[in-house]
Image (tube, rainbow, N blue to C red):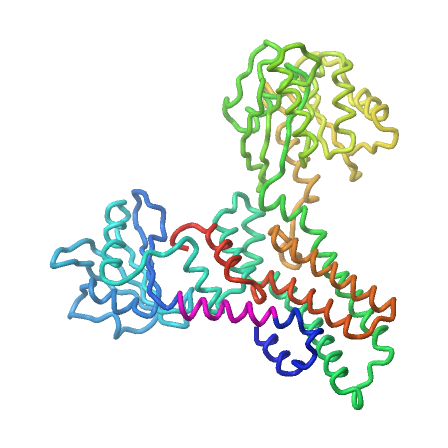
Amino acid sequence: MIIQRTYHNTCSSRADGLRTMKCDKVNYTKLEDMMNQKYSDTIAAISTAVSSSGIGIVRMTGKEAFEIADKIYVGKKEKHLGDQKSHTIHYGFIEDSGRTIDEVLVMLMRAPHSYTGEDTVEINCHGGVYVVKKVLEILIKYGARPAEPGEFTKRAFLNGKLDLSQAEAVGDLISSQNEYARQSSVNQLKGSVKKEINEIRKEIIYHTAFIETALDDPEHINVDGYGETLKEVVDHLLAKIKKLLSTCDNGRIIKEGISTVIVGKPNAGKSSLLNALLGEERAIVTDIAGTTRDVLEEHINLQGISLNIMDTAGIRNTEDIIERIGVDKARDHIEKADLILYVIDASCALDENDREIFEMICNKRSIILLNKSDLKTIVKRKDVIDELELAKNKIIIYENEFNYAIRIAEISAKNESGIKELEEIVKEMFFGGEISFNDEIYITNVRHKAALKSAYESLCKVNESIEMNMPEDFYSIDLMDAYESLGNITGETIGEDLVNEIFSKFCMGK
């Protein structure tokens, strides 16, 4: 935001070249007005789960937070919270109209040294559902307003305590369902995305300012041949953005989990495999072929990796209308899946239904499981490889020491043998073992991906203008479009409606 305002002062005379920049300033003003007008009041909310627990925390922030707290807090020696130092904890009682509500610890944090950047009070009370609701009710009675979902973090963003990528990382951290998602969220919360985006924007604004200044003062600044210099810069920035975009698939998987589909013929052991992975009898298992008619969805955590796993109807040619609908659903899910677990009954010979499945999965990331290894098996690894080669002449088989598309493993879902090997294969296929978050940034947010794509396209237009020997005005317009797109990630060029939409997805009290 400071960079934007500085740039306006430097180059405001170029109306066409600053079209996007002026739009940025409007957005900044909207956010500033939003903070000054709407968020100057004091808000309160329960910040812990509303359930019976050891403690419950009621949080309050705003310019009247200490004043309201003093109206209901009674401590030793008639202590006033408003007179106390920041980052201190005080023992006492919450009272209302002479009635003691609860025994509490009250934490004080003065602006700007708090999560929101405002005066903040956190009341630690006993964790009964009625107690915490009663404390919140009293705070509202004495002047606080019930907080909206995510409003504490929204204020942190508007007060400059967090940029928007960090604020969204807070929400992702709360909702993380596996170790990789947690680590990625923590990394973004520390500012990894912010740092990378700001470096790119800094380079863009430098060269845009140079061009605009040169066009305003052609007698003293010469831009002849500058296109070649700028192209080198743009190519470098494009490479940076392309690298960030290349992490989006892994980022989505880290955040949302691996979309996994279990496929196979009826009675191959698909439901038994699901039960083995879950560690409980979730899917119905019988000796009757076609027992599974619909798609059964479950969430599984495997060694820090989330699998959104679907058990599908057995794929075969059938006259049963309901079973056929289930088979069609299975085919649809195969197309959209990140990972296919193809279960083969290794005790029975392969047939035309198996060959149909081979054709479906030969271009997908798949693990072929030769099930029922506890029985006398007929189907061997070589048989599978031969069928894959028939399905696609150039298919590459994923074997031990090589990084190929498809892996083969022997399991017994009934006896749960080979399941640990399967878990290791999944981890290896997607992340090559361990992911390091020390020097690697993963784009996990769909909004960030869209903004990066937009910036990439704008920078490509800059190169096109350079190659076509267009006037320098065209360079600055597309450079500023890229600058604005990247600003959407950090929140510097974002409107009020989008801010409200983002934070509305947060939980209450955060």
- Give the main secondary structure of the magenta stretch: helix
Q: Quadrant of residue 206?
A: bottom right
Which range is magenta?
Answer: 23-38
Q: Where's residue 292, x and y in %?
A: 58, 17
Q: Where's residue 23, x and y in %?
A: 61, 69
Count numbered badges in the picture: 0
From the image, which quarter does the N terminus lie in? Answer: bottom right
From the image, which quarter does the C terminus lie in? Answer: bottom left
In the visual, does 504 lie left or right of 142? right
The residue at the far front in this view is 15
Q: Quadrant of residue 416?
A: top right
Q: Where's residue 108, x and y in %?
A: 32, 67
Vertical side of 118 occupied by 377: above or below: above
Q: Is residue 32 magenta?
A: yes
Q: Where's residue 319, x and y in %?
A: 67, 10
Q: Is residue 506 magenta?
A: no
Q: Quadrant of residue 147?
A: bottom left
Q: Which one is in front, 306 or 472?
A: 472
Name which residue lies at 42% across and 69% down: 117
In the visual, does 32 lie left or right of 363? left
Vertical side of 116 occupied by 396: above or below: above
Name which residue lies at 69% across and 69% down: 480
Name which residue lies at 64% across and 29% down: 261
The residue at the far bottom in this view is 220
